[in-house]
Image: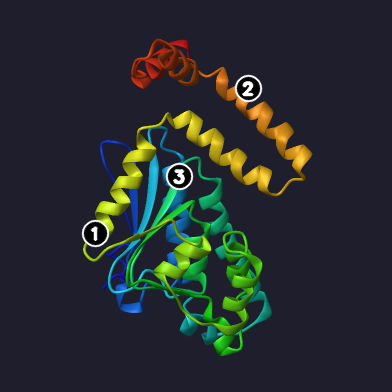
């Protein structure tokens, strides 16, 4: 079973393009985020961050569901304030590692994504869901307001829509999730992998350095006043423009030819 010492809680795969897929592997528990699962995810994300050739990270799940949130049985086993503070701090650290990762992170969602599972979707940079996927921050139904999932949810979904989900605990469909900004695409039946791949291919075709700089700036500027955001963005664009990939891309546009990203990458390595 996936909870045994011999079967990983998170499967790690990497293809020749540098596309890494992490698969949550507790299907019998609907991929609930136990402490061990949170630790395994943290380690896997850090492993991806340390790979200089990695381009995209996809978070998928085994079994019938994407993620049912925290492991409630584990949470209830030995209640104490210190334990809960440590647990939610561990979860927040893992979620922030996804945002800080210098790669676009895509959630591949099927079945349900509830509570911290919905939070995980919201913390990914992009998300593709099957047409029958459902989303909820349903802790309030158990008397536990989904406070930490609400941080991620409210940074994806408009305030009133986010608050309604938080105080009702109701599920929304994949179509509603896309309309509200929680996910990017809804895949028709049997086409989830193809829809994820189409997004992966679009990202992989772009220079890694531009995407990494852009992701970091995207999240920094969201938390700043607009004057500071523009100052940061202007500095980031100037630095980006000095990179060989950007210089090659602009010159290719001027020359009306395809850009040769590989050539600019070889030049950067030679200069290093």
User: Image point 63% across, 29% down: which residue?
Assistant: 236
Residue underneath mark 1: 191
Number of marks in the rendered image? 3
Q: Which residue is mark 3?
A: 104
Task: Indicate the position of residue 125 as horizontal and vertical percent values.
Answer: 49, 51
Give left or right: position of 211 versus 255. Answer: right
Label 2, on which residue?
A: 238
**Disc 2 from disc 1: Cα separation:** 40 Å
| Picture residue at 34% right of the left edge, 73% below the top | 111
Q: Earlier in the sequence, mark 1 or mark 3?
A: 3
CA gap, disc 3 and disc 2: 21 Å
Foreground disc of the pair 1, 3: 1
Of residues 19 and 84, the one drawn nearer to the viewer in this rendering:
19
Badge 3 local density, few (<14 within 10 Å), some, or many (20+)? many
Along the line of sight, which residue is nearer the eye, 174 or 19?
Answer: 174
Mark 1 crowd level (few <14, some 14–19, many ≥20, 10 Å Cα): some
The location of residue 62, given as percent across then percent down, is 29, 67
């Amino acid at each position: 079973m996936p909870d045994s010492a011999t079967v990983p809680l998170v499967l790690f795969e990497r293809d020749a393009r540098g596309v890494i897929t992490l698969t949550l592997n507790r299907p019998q528990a609907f991929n609930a985020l136990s402490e061990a699962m949170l630790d395994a995810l943290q380690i896997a994300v850090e492993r991806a961050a340390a790979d200089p050739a990695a381009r995209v990270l996809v978070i998928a799940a085994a079994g019938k569901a994407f993620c049912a949130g925290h492991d409630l049985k584990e949470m209830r086993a030995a209640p104490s304030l210190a334990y809960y503070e440590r647990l939610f701090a561990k979860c927040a650290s893992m979620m922030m590692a996804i945002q800080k990762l210098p790669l676009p992170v895509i959630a591949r969602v099927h079945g349900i994504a509830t509570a911290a599972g919905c939070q995980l979707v919201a913390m990914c940079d992009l998300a593709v869901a099957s047409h029958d996927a459902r989303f909820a921050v349903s802790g309030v139904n158990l008397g536990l307001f989904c406070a930490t999932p609400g941080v991620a949810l409210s940074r994806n979904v408009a305030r009133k829509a986010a608050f309604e989900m938080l105080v009702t605990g109701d599920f929304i469909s994949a179509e509603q999730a896309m309309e509200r900004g929680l996910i990017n695409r809804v895949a028709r039946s049997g086409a989830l992998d193809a829809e994820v791949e189409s997004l992966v291919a679009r990202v992989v075709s772009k220079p890694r350095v531009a995407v990494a700089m852009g992701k970091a700036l995207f999240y920094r500027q969201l938390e700043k006043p607009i004057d500071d955001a523009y100052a940061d963005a202007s500095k980031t664009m100037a630095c980006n423009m000095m990179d060989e990939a950007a210089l090659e891309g602009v010159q290719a546009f001027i020359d009306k030819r395809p850009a040769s990203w590989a050539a600019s990458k070889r030049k950067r390595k030679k200069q290093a």
